[in-house]
Image: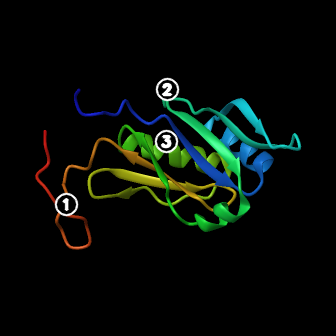
Amino acid sequence: MGEPGFEGIHHVKLPVSDLQRSREWYERVLGFVAEMEFPDEDGVVRGLSGRLPGLGRTGFALRENPEKARGISGYDPVSFGIADQAAAEAWAAKFDELGVKRTPVIEATIGWIISTFDPDGTELRFYSWAGPEKDHVGEDGYPRHVRPVSS
């Protein structure tokens, strides 16, 4: 028997304080399409799962849990892959059009980053696969490799 392996990310699940408010935000801002709902023992829907466009088989879920949502406010638990600087600029334009809070597009260590914040303040990052012309790895204020990068 060989080593067990991965086949990708099955789903990302984020805690939210108000499921309906968050559902509306994720639908409007990220194109979330709910496919399943999860009621509690009293029949109250406390969770949703579905898809975000472009993530292939990777699912996306929201789970009502105000305490945990407060706990990750200001934190970036997930970074969505985007193509390049132009894609980051396109997201910036979309966020501006929707009146959604965002960071500037920044040149990061190995790519371009823009972030927005959901209704609970959870930071959602959009990080490009294509990087800037200059690789900043190892420069002051940037990360460094802990092992050689395999090609």
Compared with residue 19, is residue 1 higher up or lower down, i.e. above or below? above
Compared with residue 35, is residue 21 higher up or lower down, i.e. above or below? below
The 10 Å Cα crowd at callout 3, few under 14, some 14 to 19, many 20 or more, is: few
Residue labelled with disc 1: 137
Amino acid under disc 1: Val
> In the rendering, at what x and y percent does residue 49 appear?
66, 35
State the count of labels: 3
Q: Nearer the viewer, residue 9 or 110?
A: 9
Q: Nearer the viewer, residue 108 or 90?
A: 108
> In the rendering, at what x and y percent does residue 116 appear?
56, 55
C-alpha gap between disc 1 and disc 3 = 26 Å
Q: Residue furthest bottom?
A: 140
Q: Which of the two labelled residues, at mark 2 and mark 1, occupies the earlier sequence position?
A: 2
Q: Which of the two labelled residues, at mark 2 and mark 3, occupies the earlier sequence position?
A: 2
Quadrant where the N terminus sits is top left
Residue labelled with disc 3: 90
Residue 58 left/right relative to 111 = right
Residue 151: image quadrant is top left
The residue at the point 44 percent across, 36 percent down is 9
Compared with residue 56, is residue 106 higher up or lower down, i.e. above or below? below
Do the numbered discs 1 and 3 sit on residues whose CB atoms are within 8 Å?
no
SS of the residue under disc 2: loop
The 10 Å Cα crowd at callout 1, few under 14, some 14 to 19, many 20 or more, is: some
C-alpha gap between disc 2 and disc 3 = 24 Å
Q: Nearer the viewer, residue 76 or 8?
A: 8
Q: Which of the two labelled residues, at mark 1 and mark 3, occupies the earlier sequence position?
A: 3
Residue labelled with disc 2: 57
Q: Residue furthest front?
A: 1
Depth check, mark 2 against mark 3: the one in front is 2
Q: Residue furthest right?
A: 42
Amino acid under disc 2: Arg
